[in-house]
Every structure is written in structure tokens, then in C-alpha cells.
Amino acid sequence: MAQGNGLTRGDRNRNRKLGELRAVVRADRAVLAIDLGEDKQVAVVMDHDNRVLARTTVRAKAHRLGGLVEWGEKVAGKQGFAGLVVACEPTGHRWMALMALAESRGHGFVGVQPLAVHRARESDDYTYAKTDHRDSYLIGKLAARLECYLPEQATEEWAQLRHLGARRAELITAVTGYRQQAGDLLGCAWPAALDVARRPLESVTWQAAMMVVLSRCGGHPGRLRRMGYEKFLAAVRRELPRWGGQKLCHAIVKGLWDALADPAGVTAQRPGALERLHMVLEDWLALRARLAGTQKRMLEVLDSLGLTELAGSIDGVSPLSAAVILAESGDPSRFSSGRALVKHAGLNPSEHSSATMTGQSRISRRGRPGLRTAAWRAVWAGLRHNTVLQAKYRHLTTREESRLAAGQARVACAAAILRWLRAVITAGTAWDPAIAAGHAAPEAIAA
């Protein structure tokens, strides 16, 4: 919608971003573009008319490129430039080392998206030919045209939270893998053990009882029938605290006890499969302990940032859920608006329209997959405990016009959680249901 001088919100945001980029990619700075590799770095110095001033190849690690930056300084100085702006693709961790070197010498630094370089190859000469020398030129060309971005400048605490979030994601993937492996092994060798509960692999009672069985049966579950049910129950009760449980589900324990005598399954595979399953459960238990430790450290970092109360003030969003989201997003104050954070997650609607034609809109999925997943998972608890989110979901799924499906409404709720989280952190005030629901005065909403 046009306002005043006719500029839309998108126009203003683009103008602001271009201004921030132009403050770094200045006309008095030459562009040092580097195609980063593990041991081989191809660099080119260019002016803002995309003319190549010098080119070189260096065989060194990224953190040893101080000499390359110094070489770029000399080339730029001879051509009348006051300094450099260093540009590269975000390759692994190497771009961080290069950014630190550039900033330590007072130069600017920008990143260029790999997708933009990929598309620039074809637009350059209508081919997809790829070489390190060509890519370095394209990186510099895109940077000079301001088709680049300013990377995140993370502090030590925000960087620590991001690393802990990545570690947590690895552990969850591993725990999920062990759970699926346990189900596959039992489905082959002893399927009756999976029929004792609706979701046995998620039950701490079942996990503790299964560990008791596997540690004593020697690959033949029927042998445990000799010990009697009461002793078996007592052994499971002693094992339960190791799995984080406090109360037994007697129906599951009794069901597994009855399953000990069930012969269904591939008999020849049972001893080896159960021995392997015992090892899997031991690893599973250790991973759960590491996961709990990692999550505890994430909460400690969140507390050191002074964000525990603010992030936890949103009904239905626990401090841990907030920490997981912030580990993926970084400091939300670096985003100009809540919409920008939602776009970073790839949860923004991707509109398809032209003149009188309106196509189907979907979420863009162009952002960080981890952030999108973290926000999506936070929705489920939010819908149970947050009345504002419940009302939003109910309205989106029951309105007469443009009614959304359940999954689409949850995506909208995930985007709302991201906007709320940014708002409470940047404003430094606790979440207010009235503001979130749009019932507060405009002054309060603006604040």
C-alpha cells in the first residue's frame, strides 16, 4: 500500500538495506573477491565497473590469508582506492576467518549467496561452466552491484548459543535414529514387545522394562519368566530412574511380562538382534544424558543473555523452545522487523500474482530450515496453552473467506511466535496478550 510519497513498505526496506550495503561497499573501496577453498584460494581485485585490476591464487588455509588481504590493499592503493571490501561465499567456517582478517585491517566485508553465483554463471555467458577463477569474478561482480548481504556479527554468547543449538540438533537426530533402529530390530526378532503400548518407544516404563529384559535374557526373553513377575516388577522399578521416570505404568510392565513367552518373530535372528538392541539402548541412554546436558547449557546461556524471563513470558513457549529458536535465528534485534525474521525462517507467504491473475500462495521455504523446524515445533505447545494463538488458529480455520487448512494455520501461528519473540526481546518488555491480540492502543503496539 502506497503512503505519502508513494513508496511501499517493501520499497523502504529495500532502500534501507541498500543504504547499509553502500556504507560498506563504498565507491572509494576496491572489491577483493575470493573463491574460498580448503587449501586453494583464488582472488581477484575489481573496480565498481567490474574491471579486473589484478588476480592471484594462494595456497593457504583461510585463517592464513592476511598476506592475501595485504596484497589486495597494495593493488587497490596503486589504483587510487582508499581501501577494500572483501567478498566471498559463506563456505563452511572459512568465511568467518576471512571476515575477522578483513575487519582487523579496517576493511569492509560482505557475503554473496551461492545461489546468486550459480545463477550469475548462466547470465554471464549463457553457460553453466564453473571454474574457481570465474567464480571469484562473479562474486566480485555481484558485490559491486550490491547483490550481497552483511553477515551476522555474533557476540561470544550468541555464537555459543548457536553452537549449542547445532549440537542439540545432532543429538536429537541421533536419538531419533536409535529409536527407529530399536523398532526395526524388535519388529524382526520380537514383535510382541511392540504391542504392549500404543507408543512403546516413547514410554519410559517400556524403555526401563526392556533394558531389564535385555540385560538378563541373553537373547532369549522367555528365560526371565523363571524369576517371577514380582521380582521383574521390582527390577523395572529400580531401572526406571535411569530413564528419567518416576511412576510405573503397570499395564506396560505386565504386557511386556506376558510378551516374554510369545514366540512370534524370526527365531534365528532373535539372539543377535536382541544383543544388538541392548547396545543400542545403552547408547540411547547415554545420548539422552548428553542431550539433557546440552539443553541445560543452552538455558544457562539464555539466562546470561538476560532473556530467560522475556522469552518465557510468552504463554505456551518454554525458555528451552525460545533458546532453540534463538540458536537458529541469532540476535533477533538484527532484523528490521518481525516480518524479516519470518522471512529468514522461510515461513513468509510466497505470492504469485500478475494483473488480474492470482496464483496459489505457499510459504517460500527459502530461509533457514532449522529455524523453520524450531518455530513449527513450538506451535504444538503454544496451541495448548496460549489463548491468543488458539483464537488465531480457530479464526484462520473457520472464517468464511480464504479459510486455511489446519497445516496452513499452524504455519501462520509459527510465524506469529517468531514475531512475538522478536518483539519482546527488542522492546525489552514481557509478552502482553492484549498487544498480541491487537486489542491494545496503537502506542503500546508500536512500543
Image (tube, grey):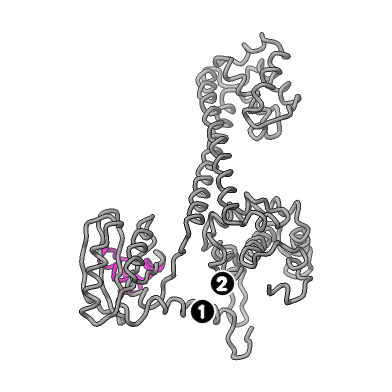
**Residue 31 vs residue 394, the one in the foreground:** 31
Where residue 116 appears, as percent x and y from the top left, is 40, 68
Tell me the quarter of the picture where residue 217 sits. Answer: top right
List the single residue furthest toward the bottom: 5
- Residue 272 shown left or right of residue 48 in the figure: right
Magenta span includes 119:
yes
Residue 433 vertical position relative to residue 12 in the rendered view, above or below? above
**x 39%, y 61%: residue:** 90
Figure quadrant of the C terminus = bottom right
Instruction: Evaluate if marks 1 and 2 touch, with contact meaning CB atoms under 8 Å apart.
Output: yes
Residue holding disc 1: 16
Q: Which mark is residue 203?
A: none
Magenta residue span:
116-139
**Residue type for callout 1:** Arg
Residue 238 vertical position relative to residue 396 in the rendered view, above or below? above
Magenta span includes 254:
no
Residue holding disc 2: 336
Where residue 338 appears, as percent x and y from the top left, is 61, 68
